[in-house]
Image: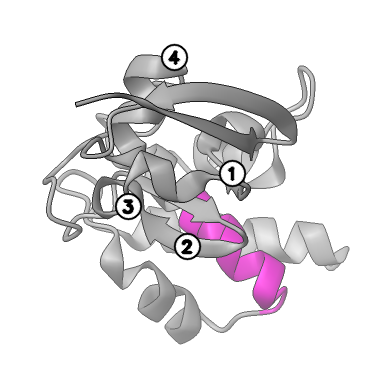
Amino acid sequence: MSRIHVATTVNGDAVDFLADPRESLLDCLRDTLGLTGTKEGCGTGDCGACSVRLDGVLVCSCLVLGVEAEGKQIETVEGLASGGTLHPLQRKFIEHAALQCGFCTPGILVAAKALLDENPDPSEEEVRFWLAGNLCRCTGYDKIIRAVMDAAAEMRGAA
């Protein structure tokens, strides 16, 4: 099967790549573009490890075809930090020890940023609900929730 040219924007940069029409966006990001922060956990959209934003919508990149990214804006975990400065969510995850093995962390960070972009002052219940699609086998979630809540406060200037 012939590959299809895809022109898109990834983390603010114009990107062109060739994709097999059957290839997932996850595989295109990792294997073609070398953005390995996005992880494949389940391949069925159940774990959230592959979470990215596609035109501002949080999606499981394992369930989206790479060719569907044509003309769209993609945001991955690699786009969170600005230059050498970590995003507040990244810093708070470190400060709160909200990661252990780290496999799920990129997807959780992308999902948490999507939440805070939509709702800069979420309740704990809203954070837990929003992140329910991101599974973690190591942390027990409490440190993750605290890190997101603390980052939200800092980003609002309420720290």
Could you tell me how far apart the alpha carbons at marks 2 and 4 are, in whole angstroms?
21 Å
Q: Secondary structure at mark 3?
A: loop
Expressed as whole percent of the image width and height from the top left, the position of residue 138 reads 18, 43
What residue is disc 4 on?
34
What residue is disc 1 on?
75
Q: Earlier in the sequence, mark 2 or mark 1?
A: 2
Q: Are marks 2 and 4 in contact (CB under 8 Å)?
A: no
Q: Secondary structure at mark 2?
A: strand
> How crowded is the residue under tag 1: few (<14 C-alpha within 10 Å), some, or many (20+)?
many
Which SS does the magenta portion mostly show? helix
Expressed as whole percent of the image width and height from the top left, the position of residue 104 reads 29, 42
Towards the viewer: 156 or 74: 74
Q: Are marks 1 and 4 in contact (CB under 8 Å)?
A: no
Q: Earlier in the sequence, mark 2 or mark 4?
A: 4
**60 relative position to 150: left or right:** left
User: Which picture quadrant has residue 63?
Assistant: bottom left
Q: Are marks 2 and 3 in contact (CB under 8 Å)?
A: no
Q: Earlier in the sequence, mark 2 or mark 3?
A: 2
> How crowded is the residue under tag 2: few (<14 C-alpha within 10 Å), some, or many (20+)?
many
> How crowded is the residue under tag 3: few (<14 C-alpha within 10 Å), some, or many (20+)?
some
Q: Secondary structure at mark 4?
A: loop
Amino acid residing under circle 3:
Val
What residue is disc 2 on?
58
Amino acid residing under circle 4:
Gly
Towards the viewer: 42 or 8: 8
Instruction: Say which residue appears at 63% left-offset and 47% top-offset.
Output: 71
Could you tell me how far apart the alpha carbons at marks 2 and 3 are, in whole angstroms?
11 Å
For the record, the magenta segment spans 109-121
Comparing labels 3 and 1, the label whose residue is closer to the camera: 3
Q: Earlier in the sequence, mark 3 or mark 1?
A: 3
What residue is disc 3 on?
64
- Of the 4 image quadrants, the one containing the C terminus is bottom right
